[in-house]
Amino acid sequence: MKTERFGEFGGSYVAEPLKKCLAEISQGFEQAFNDAQFKEMHHRLQRDYIGRPSPLYFAEALSKDLGGARVYFKREDLNHTGSHKINNSIGQALLAKYLNKKRVIAETGAGQHGVAMATACALLSLECIVYMGAKDYHRQSSNVQKMNLLGATVIPVTSGSQSLKDSMNEALRDWVNHSESTYYAVGTAAGPTPFPRLVRELQKIIGIEARRQLLERETTLPDQVIACIGGGSNAIGLMHAFYDDKKVELIGVEAAGKGIGSGLSSAAISEGTIGVLHGNRSYYLQDTGGQVREAYSISAGLDYPGVGPEHALLHKTGRAKYVSATDKEALSAFHYLARTEGIIPALEPAHALAYVIKTAPSMRKDQILLMNLCGRGDKDMTIVQEAMDAH
């Protein structure tokens, strides 16, 4: 937690009132995760409440059908609440409690971070306020219902593109006005210092487990590690354990929406330029005047115009490669996994799966692809049906 930047990326470009809050969170994180009682509680909830370790699953039928590399899924969709988001939410809710905050605010796109945060706050008796773009509020209505049931107050955001970027804007405004009593739980590996590293530290258990599990199963490391990327928490959580394994290729799959060059995508690395948004320097979709463009994706969780600063560094140094998948490719992958493995994925990891489907057949049968199946698709059934009806 001591490094504020990732090379030229990251930083803390925020209003003066928030600098004290960020310093408090940074210091609290250092102290809490060196506190034996805190660590014991965190570990117990990871094991008994979240359900960790999550399984590593060999997709035998899919691998056979594709006819190339062996494909393994890290099954974060089997966590409590149905995605990787609960790893971060439990950790940050515990930290809010440790810092004696009574009120927690969060932003959400697909609703999974909102549901996970509402869940953690219900467990730990914390007030929970979730900001959600009005567009996402309607297309992810089942998650809104869950958040309400869990006792959270969900506030639809009607400004801008009414999606994740605007939800984060509103959450930051709330925090400025209620900084003394409120903890802001950022849901992705972006935002001002210390959030990119804090979220990474809470999500890196994904890669730590997967690396150990695969070595036990195959006695070798994967050839490629693959994850979808919006802000980038599930991807950074999987990739981090493999940074020093230079023979392991790290692949992030962005949402290309209607296609690269169409003006309707969320591919911030593929199409973006370096700028500042939400308190940190990274790659963002911007016009020639430096204004942030609206992002688009069929997947609410990837519908963000930027990428976390650690991913920006991994791209700049070449340690990770970032590719993209369109709405059409993600929808095809969504149906394919359901029919080959009996697993209904969220639309977010369906983008990563689209890359796997294209790549695996050209690889040798002794090669291994490890993909983070970071969420389940219950929340996306209405969106998928609407897309099918439209065609």
Image (cartoon, helix red, strand yellow):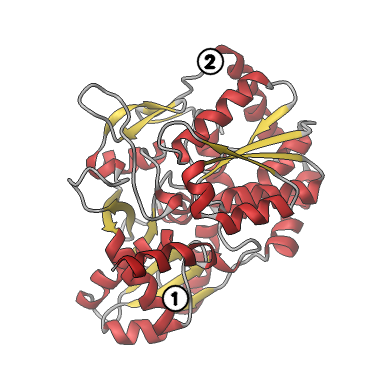
Q: Which residue is mark 2?
A: 15
Q: Quadrant of residue 172?
A: top right
Residue at the spot 68% in from the left edge and 21% down from the top edge: 179
Q: Earlier in the sequence, mark 2 or mark 1?
A: 2
Residue at the spot 38% in from the left edge and 75% down from the top edge: 335
Element class at badge 2: loop
Q: Which residue is mark 1?
A: 219
Judged left or right of residue 294, residue 177 is right
Q: Quadrant of residue 286?
A: top left
Image coords of residue 306 (percent x, y): 37, 38
On the rendered image, what quadrant is the C terminus found in?
Answer: bottom left
Q: Give above or below for 384 relative to 310.
A: below
Judged left or right of residue 141, residue 97 is right
Which residue is nearer to you in this view: 360 or 271?
271
Tell me the kind of residue under disc 1.
Thr
Q: Residues within 10 Å of mark 1 (few under 14, many from 20)?
A: few
Which residue is nearer to you in this view: 215 or 250?
250
Q: Residues within 10 Å of mark 2 (few under 14, many from 20)?
A: few
